[in-house]
């Protein structure tokens, strides 16, 4: 199978042109795609027409799949798929997570072994207004961010570790007006606070990533609270500087594969019903 590539931005992302993902990729092509992925953090495939089964089968080629902690937003017939959507069913209930990813984050950095990658497939996208699109997603390279830090800051954070907390994220989102119910005791048990190095070598490439994000990183260990907060704020703001970011304007049929060990992302919430957005996400475990 042959394909072409096109860079998406200077420090992150590649578009792959000419592959039909509804067909199983042969092993040689898959290996090429994986190399491209490891080097670029996100891959975009446009104009795909995938059934849920094909989306899942493709995702499995990258590793075993996660079943998300928010069980009510998994497809009942395909629990590997997490529904991200603002659409309501006939009885006015949300069919998916309506406010997923509206702060910068790497998926599941709040678990001990964060998931490797995610595959988000656009099934329905709000209609653009001329050039004005809605429901874009921004992606930032954690590796480019680390590499651009000054040597002094790199040395200062070399051995630091940070706490990542799903529960703290929930509490914060609720304070900001999110309608999500509190995590149940069971969900809290499934996602206890975890600790990660602030500089996390990518498990495949070994390249160092600035592994903190505004959603889940709550404090740096062995620092006074004020000092920890100042450092986290500084690193988080630096990590989302324009030069590390690619902003994707979705079209129906786009599939983006992103590396949670090398990138973070942000869903831009600038649309509301009757504008409808329906995305299906699969998430590939670390192993
Ligand atoms: C997510 O963070 O998984 C959702 C991203 C999006 O809906 O753009």
Image: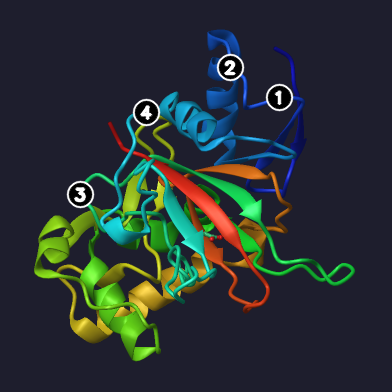
Q: Residue at x 55, y 66 (%)?
A: 267
Tag 1 near tag 3, CB within 8 Å: no
The x and y percentages for residue 254 are 68, 45
State how far apart marks 1 and 3 are (Cα). 34 Å
State how far apart marks 3 and 4 are (Cα). 17 Å
Disc 4 target residue: 63
Q: Is residue 179 left or right of residue 268?
A: left
Tag 1 near tag 4, CB within 8 Å: no
SS class, disc 1: loop
Q: Tell me if mark 2 has few (under 14), some (14-19) or many (20+) residues whose alpha carbon lies within 10 angstroms of its own.
A: some
State how far apart marks 2 and 1 are (Cα). 9 Å
Give whichever of 192, 127 is nearer the camera. Answer: 127
Mark in the foreground, 1 or 3: 1
Disc 1 target residue: 19
Disc 3 target residue: 112
Chain-order first, disc 1 or disc 3: 1
């Amino acid at each position: 199978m042959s394909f072409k590539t096109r860079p998406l931005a200077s420090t992150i992302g590649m578009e792959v042109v000419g592959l039909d993902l509804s067909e199983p990729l042969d092993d040689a092509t898959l290996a090429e795609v994986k190399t491209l992925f490891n080097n670029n953090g996100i891959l975009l495939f446009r104009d795909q027409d995938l059934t849920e089964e094909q989306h899942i089968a493709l995702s499995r080629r990258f590793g075993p799949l996660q079943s998300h902690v928010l069980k009510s937003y998994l497809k009942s017939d395909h629990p590997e798929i997490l529904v991200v959507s603002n659409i309501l069913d006939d009885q006015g209930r949300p069919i998916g997570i309506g406010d997923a990813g509206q702060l910068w984050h790497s998926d599941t950095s709040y678990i001990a072994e964060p998931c490797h990658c995610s595959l988000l497939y656009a099934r329905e996208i709000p209609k653009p207004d001329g050039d004005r699109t809605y429901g874009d997603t921004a992606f930032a390279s954690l590796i480019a961010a680390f590499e651009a830090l000054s040597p002094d800051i790199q040395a200062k954070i070399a051995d630091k570790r940070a706490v990542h907390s799903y529960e703290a994220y929930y509490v914060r989102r609720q304070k900001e007006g999110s309608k999500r119910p509190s995590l149940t005791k069971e969900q809290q048990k499934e996602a206890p606070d975890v600790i990660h190095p602030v500089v996390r070598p990518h498990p495949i490439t070994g390249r160092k990533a600035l592994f903190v994000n505004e959603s889940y990183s709550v404090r740096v260990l062995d620092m006074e609270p004020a000092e920890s907060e100042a450092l986290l704020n500084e690193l988080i703001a630096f990590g989302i500087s324009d030069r590390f970011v690619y902003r994707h304007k979705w079209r129906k049929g786009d599939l983006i594969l992103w590396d949670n060990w090398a990138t973070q992302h942000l869903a831009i919430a600038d649309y509301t019903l009757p504008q409808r957005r329906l995305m299906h996400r699969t998430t590939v475990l670390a192993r």
